[in-house]
Image: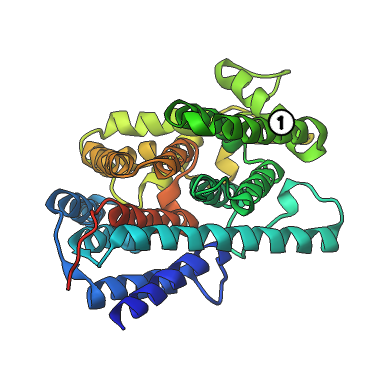
Amino acid sequence: MQQNLFRFTGYAAAFLLPLALVWLSPIYGLIAWAIGFLAFGTLAPKIWPMLLFAAFVDWELITVYWSDNRPAGWVDVVMVLPFGLMGVLANGLTVEDPQRWGRRFADAFAWATTLCWTAIFGYSLMTYGWVSYNDFALGERLGIHFQSLYLIIAALILERRIWSEPKGVSWASAVAVLWLLVGIIFLSARIHLLSVPVLIMARLFELYRRNPSWRKYILRWGTIALAVMGAMVLTLPGPSSRVEDLVNELRSVDGMVEGKQTNHRIFLWKYGMDIIKEAPLLGVGNGHGEDVLHEKLLTCDAKFYNKKEPYYLHEFRYDFHNVWIQSWAEGGIIAFLLMAGIFLWGLTQSTGSMSYAWIALLMSSMTESLLDKQAGVFLLTFMVALTALSSRKHQSLR
């Protein structure tokens, strides 16, 4: 009975996460899952991970006290609280056969994400016809970046299942992975257009080296995946224009392209680093970082263009678009080291395709403030729970 109830809470979290509905928030599923750990878990503390996540939450609270924008600081604390608390709970409690449950909940999330993407793709086609990347919306809360990130994590989870059939590959999983890769191309988040081919080639090389008997399947599916993605990027107007934008952004790192600035993030990172230099030890306080960044942008005379209309960065409200710069700017070197410790824990405690999921999160964190958005916090919270379950050895608790 207890196992069934725990299974229900985990599946609720997995299925609600990609839906991202306003009226049925993923936080309800994550809260239910946390209650499931508390109600049906057995005490089996892993001290260092528990201390790491507890220290992360504590430091988020402490840094509010020297912030000049405490209301925003408290909002940020509430935002990241599920992430920190799940890290403490999932590393402090365990259930019988945790690795099996970790795999099942991961699969549930992956298939739910695949179904959601399929549904919204069909809806978009019926509503708009042949559409560009910004006409898609997975759920009601996810922007392009997070939609694409969810698809990447789901594809990596299902990739593991491709090789799980005793008599051959799992064709259903293989087709689903290809379909998710198609979705990533349609969504065309620029960092993912750059990082996904790298992840694919690294993962294929690892599989090819470790599984000699599977090499023909690995070469076949790897070639198909890369060929499909390459053909779509080169032929579809939406993805090809995004690749052109990406090239221009990379070219504009050291200057302008055709007399225009095209890379917002370079300036956000530059002024973010200036904030770090001014308060390297303790930061400016939780919630105050974006205020200081906006003040810095008032001095930025770089001119950008929306088609032919010029604008300046200080006309809009930006975050740092980088987890690491934001953590250090607001919480000082301690916040940066705690965040680095959490990602290092995730990378070292996961194996196979799940370790590549953490690498994908790490890559995304370089261009997006993952903990500044609910979609990022919820996904990281789910990944922390999966990693904690998967890292435990099988044991009988009866």
Quadrant location of the N terminus? bottom left
Which sits in the foreground, 330 or 161?
Answer: 161
Outermost residue toward the right in this view: 129
Quadrant of residue 189 in the image? top right
The answer to whether residue 226 is above or below residue 188 is above
Quadrant location of the C terminus? bottom left
Outermost residue toward the bottom in this view: 1
Can residue 149 be seen here? The reply is no
Dot 1 crowding, Cα within 10 Å, few <14, some 14–19, many 20+:
few
Which sits in the foreground, 289 or 226?
Answer: 226
Residue type at mark 1: give it: Ala
Q: Residue at x 15, y 52 (%)?
A: 51
212 left or right of 224 in image: left
Can residue 11 be seen here? The reply is yes
The answer to whether residue 244 is above or below residue 258 is below
Quadrant of residue 243 in the image? top right
Where residue 268 appears, x then y in whole percent? 49, 34
Residue corresponding to mark 1:
227
Q: Residue at x 58, y 57 (%)?
A: 142
Outermost residue toward the top in this view: 254
User: What kind of element bears circle 1?
Assistant: helix
Q: Residue at x 30, y 38 (%)?
A: 328
- What colour scheme does the image use? rainbow
Where residue 275 appears, x then y in whole percent? 35, 34
28 left or right of 216 in image: left
Where residue 339 appears, x then y in whole percent? 29, 43
Which sits in the foreground, 81 or 347?
Answer: 347
Outermost residue toward the front in this view: 167
Q: Residue at x 29, y 80 (%)?
A: 2
